[in-house]
Amino acid sequence: QLLAYKCLQTTFHDEFGVTKMIGKGSFAKVYLAAKKQSGVQYAIKAFNKEFMLEQFKGKESLENEIRVMRRLNQENLVHLHEAYETQNSIYFVIDLLQGGELLTRAKTNPFSLDTIQKLMYNFIKALVHIHSKKCIHRDLKPENLLLKSKESNVDVVIADFGLGAFLGEEILFKRCGTPGFVAPEILMYKEDDPFYDEKCDIFSAGVIFYILLTGRQPFQGTDYKAILRANKNCEINYNIKQIQQASPKLQELLRKMLQQNPKDRPSAESCLQHPYFEEIFNKNDLVE
Ligand code: ADP
Ligand code: MG
């Protein structure tokens, strides 16, 4: 058995009918499945054991992902129901997010400023929960943000805790995440440097904010190296119509979240208190 975590062994295919693949990341494939007994649909995140063990220190990283997900419980975070282990695979049974990836939706039908405001509010609210549980996500990027339903553009859900970590614990992958979306301090990380913290998630949330507003990524370059360099040096072009036409409150929050020095970035909690969210905050806490 690969996982120390109590897993349900070998009964997976008796209990679930898998229909089709609905997503793919660098670690896992995600399938649509229905529980045979109840007919309820789930997403199944499937890992090949051999691949994980060879490539990614599989055992620790899978246990880590389970541990982080088990600690979290909030409506804008993907929920892990159960983990199964068979001879060749590990399966995570998670909530099916019917709306698909956030950016796919945003591309076909660009979001209004009003939608972006509510969406960012829900997104940061989920970050407040993650950080309050002393966890960090470390891999916030467009393909890890999904929408709950086809109807709503603001019910965003954070998925993929594969690089999740616990603050104050020794971290598994010290330099990780995806260039273009990651905080500069993660790319700069060296063994003898002071450690980075949950502010790395604020930076990546700022990158997503930027993409939603402008439809383009903040770190551009003709090749991978150029993107990496722009990301490391935190060279961001704010001279874009959609940003300049947005309210001063929005611009201020965006710039604060994308500060190069993590100490200059607001916490998730203070992002929610920012004047940009004032109107929503006054109306109600639950934004639909
Ligand atoms: P990896 O760790 O390999 O990146 P992810 O957890 O990010 O795997 O899942 C890969 C892709 O599968 C996501 O980018 C998304 O498109 C899709 N996906 C993940 N979880 C769900 C879900 N709960 N419901 C629907 N699609 C999902
Ligand atoms: Mg992913």
Image (tube, grey):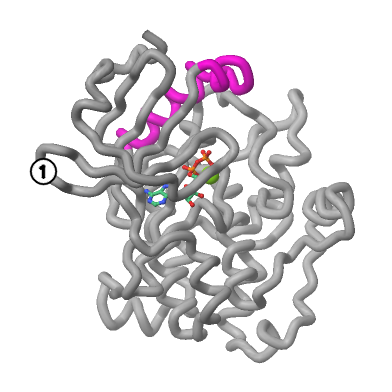
Work out whether residue 131 can be spotted: no
Where is residue 84, by image quadrant?
top left
Q: Main secondary structure of the magenta part?
A: helix
Quadrant placement of the N terminus: top left
Residue 48 vs residue 20, the one in the foreground:
20
Residue at 27%, 17% in the rendered image = 10
Quadrant placement of the C terminus: bottom left
- Residue at the extreme top of the image, as rendered: 1
Residue 63 covered by magenta stretch: yes
Residue at 27%, 71% in the rendered image = 285
Mark 1 residue CB less than 8 A from any atom of ligand 1: no
Instruction: Say if 198 sits above or below 269 in the image.
Output: above
Q: Answer with left or right where residue 174 lies relative to residue 131.
A: right
Instruction: Say if 143 sits above or below 211 in the image.
Output: above
Q: Secondary structure at mark 1?
A: loop
- Residue at the extreme left of the image, as rendered: 37
Q: Answer with left or right where residue 213 lies relative to residue 285.
A: right
Instruction: Say if 101 sits above or below 175 in the image.
Output: below
- Residue at the extreme bottom of the image, as rendered: 245
Instruction: Say if 200 sits above or below 214 in the image.
Output: above
- Residue 41 image point, x, y percent: 24, 48
Residue at 67%, 62% in the rendered image = 258
Residue at 35%, 48% in the rendered image = 78
- Residue 265 image point, x, y percent: 61, 58
Q: Amino acid at mark 1?
A: Ser
Span of residues in magenta: 50-71
- Residue 219 image point, x, y percent: 77, 61
Residue 219 covered by magenta stretch: no
Where is residue 257, by image quadrant?
bottom right
The residue that label 1 is drawn on is: 38
Work out whether residue 103 can be spotted: yes
- Residue 110 image point, x, y percent: 55, 81
